[in-house]
Image (cartoon, rainbow, N blue to C red):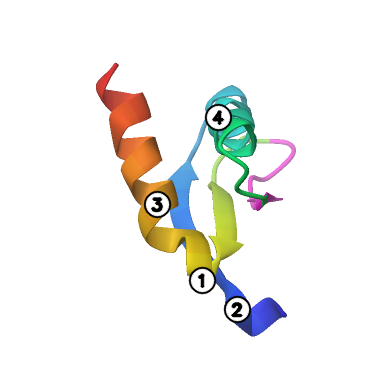
Amino acid sequence: MASDLVNIFSTDKVYFAELIRQMLADHHIHCFIINKQDSAYKFGDIEIFVHRDHVIRAKMLIRDFEAH
């Protein structure tokens, strides 16, 4: 299963990763958020992963979401 997951988006803002997660869920795309930020200094990224079958659709939805 883990090999079927693809990183489609990274950000340094937790709230934006959650907005993306909710938007994908609204379109029936399940995703996983991996927070790689340091808890003390807040450097690093939050990464969003989806199943490889949903990569293209998820990237298109994120692109449209960022444009608005």
Where residue 14 sits in the image (x, y, percent)?
62, 30
Residue indicated by mark 1: 52
What amino acid does circle 1 point to? Arg
- Say which residue label 3 marks: 57
State if disc 3 and disc 2 touch (CB < 8 Å): no
Q: Secondary structure at mark 3?
A: helix
Q: Kindly report the distance in space between the C-alpha atoms of the residues bearing marks 1 and 4.
A: 18 Å
Tell me what residue is drawn at x 50 percent, y 36 percent. Answer: 12
Which comes sooner in the sequence, label 2 or label 3? Answer: 2
Q: Which residue does the image show at 53% across and 33% down from the upper left?
A: 20
Q: Position of residue 23 (x, y in %)?
A: 55, 29
| Amino acid residing under circle 2 | Asp
Q: Which mark is residue 17?
A: none
Q: Quadrant of the C terminus?
A: top left
* 38 in magenta: yes
Are the residues flagged by discs 1 and 2 in contact, CB closer than 8 Å?
yes
Q: Give the residue at mark 2.
A: 4
- Of callouts 2 and 4, the N-terminal one: 2
**Magenta stretch in the rendered image:** 31-40
Mark closer to the observer (2, 3): 3
Name the amino acid, label 4.
Met
Residue at 74%, 39% (x, y): give it: 39
Assess disc 3: are there few (<14), some (14-19) or many (≥20) residues with their C-alpha within 10 Å of its C-alpha: few
Residue 3: name its quadrant: bottom right
Q: CA distance from mark 3 to mark 1?
A: 10 Å
How much space separates mark 3 and mark 4, taking CA atoms? 12 Å
Of the image marks 1 and 4, the number of the one nearer the N terminus: 4
Q: Is residue 44 magenta?
A: no
Secondary structure at badge 2 equals helix
